Image (cartoon, helix red, strand yellow):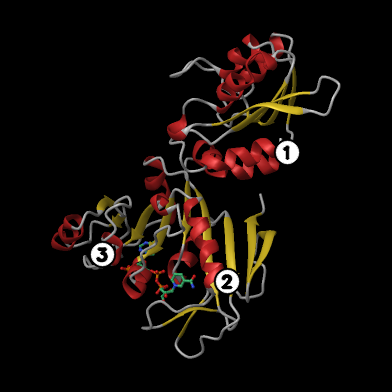
Amino acid sequence: MAAAIRLSLWHRGLTADNPSVGSIVVRADGRAPTIVGRGVTAYGGRPHAELQALAEAGDAARGATVYATLEPCSHIGKAPPCADAIVAAGVSRVVIATLDPDQRVAGRGVAILRKAGIEVVVGCRQEEARRAMAGFLSLRGRGRPYLTLKLAVSHDGMIGRQGAGQVAITGALARRAVQMMRIEHEAIMVGVGTAVADDPLLTARLDGLEGRTPIRVVIDPFARMLSAARMFDDMAAPAPIVLVSEKAAQNRIDGLAARGAQIRAVASDYRGRFDPREILRVLGVSGIKSVLLEGGAETARRFLDAGLVDRIALFRGSGIVGEAGVAAPIGPEAVPHGFSQVDAAVYGEDRLTVFERNS
Ligand SMILES: NC(=O)c1ccc[n+]([C@@H]2O[C@H](COP(=O)([O-])OP(=O)(O)OC[C@H]3O[C@@H](n4cnc5c(N)ncnc54)[C@H](OP(=O)(O)O)[C@@H]3O)[C@@H](O)[C@H]2O)c1
């Protein structure tokens, strides 16, 4: 199952409405187990992982074990159900990490398999598999994307300096790790304060992965963003989404739209403030399953206060920002309240600690 989960990560963010599922077919035959078929949900969501793994295994699937990170589907959509294909292939055992989150179909795939006399095991490495498809599970189960907050905090607890534009808090290695995080999400989001102060590109710039920039989203109730922003220069990247309120001036909206921005109106209160829940709902309606929130301080605080941050990737740099620093919404050392550490890494002088909300 660990191998199937690793395989599932290959197409994360590239399978449209579907989760990226991994599946492998294994034969033992009295020898060491051998993988005879592998599949990962194809770009755009079809064909499903199990069908590809079975196709690669061919006749070797008869009597073999199929591992799948998600319950094989049971409904007839654009393709015949995977559960039926597994039965037809003569598989003798199926190991599943997690059931389908859709309560209307959960357990149906398993039922088809068991009815055909196949031994089924559910729950193998469930937590790991659920983490790998957290975006899909979140959108299906909660109607909103999974939200990761990424912040780089200096030794003195700052994320930037007033009026200084982009301040390097971490070194080159940590910044590469952030690039990797970007392509693992379907959207990157910032508040307009950051968009104006830093004029960031927010693109994926790793060699060979330049085409993988996710949708960039700016929370901008009054359309304050500059139409000259560099974000609009990269014609190859998807057009940025700018979330505006009804209080934004039409000429400013028109200026941004003329630069290619996708303007989305979000309901706001009398001050032009959005309920962060509404922001995620609007993104979820567009099919966005996972969002990397890259600050700044005010925006991060609002999502934290609303209890909507699922994961925090906290980079701690060794430098000092000093005077006129923009204070981080999270202490440089403390574990944020309600979160537990799940991972850590060192990038040169910088440390990354990853926290997840306690469920
Ligand atoms: N080190 C890091 O990881 C990092 C990352 C990003 C940014 N930064 C730094 O952070 C600083 C900018 O942070 P900041 O706190 O000033 O600005 P910010 O969080 O980027 O933007 C705040 C603004 O976004 C809009 N906004 C956010 N949430 C909203 C909501 N729920 N409803 C309506 N509007 C919402 C509001 O715009 P209006 O004011 O128009 O209402 C708000 O004032 C810069 O110095 C930047 O360099 C550091």
User: What's the residue at 32%, 59% (across, down)?
Assistant: 269
Q: In which quarter of the image is ligand 1?
A: bottom left
Circle 3 crowding by C-alpha within 10 Å: few under 14, some 14–19, many from 20: some
The amino acid marked with disc number 1 is Arg
On the picture, is 64 further left or further right than 81?
right
Q: In which quarter of the image is the N terminus?
A: top right
Circle 2 crowding by C-alpha within 10 Å: few under 14, some 14–19, many from 20: many
- Mark 3 = which residue? 222
The amino acid marked with disc number 2 is Ile
Please tell me the numbered disc located at residue 125. 1
**Quadrant of the rendered image containing residue 109:** top right
Tell which residue pokes out farthest to the bottom in this image: 323
Number of callouts: 3
Please tell me the numbered disc located at residue 177. none
* Front in this rendered view, residue 134 or 334: 134
- Determine the CA span between mark 1 and mark 2: 31 Å
Tell which residue pokes out farthest to the right in this image: 30
Q: How far across and down, in percent of the image, does residue 51 sit?
A: 56, 21
Secondary element at image label 3: loop
Please tell me the numbered disc located at residue 330. 2
The answer as to whether callout 3 falls within 8 Å of ligand 1 is yes
Q: How far across and down, in percent of the image, does residue 29 sit?
A: 82, 19
On the picture, is 293 further left or further right than 335?
left
**Quadrant of the rendered image containing residue 355:** bottom right
The reply to whether the C-beta atoms of the residues labelled 3 and 1 are less than 8 Å apart is: no
Secondary element at image label 1: loop
Q: How far across and down, in percent of the image, does residue 74 sit?
A: 56, 18
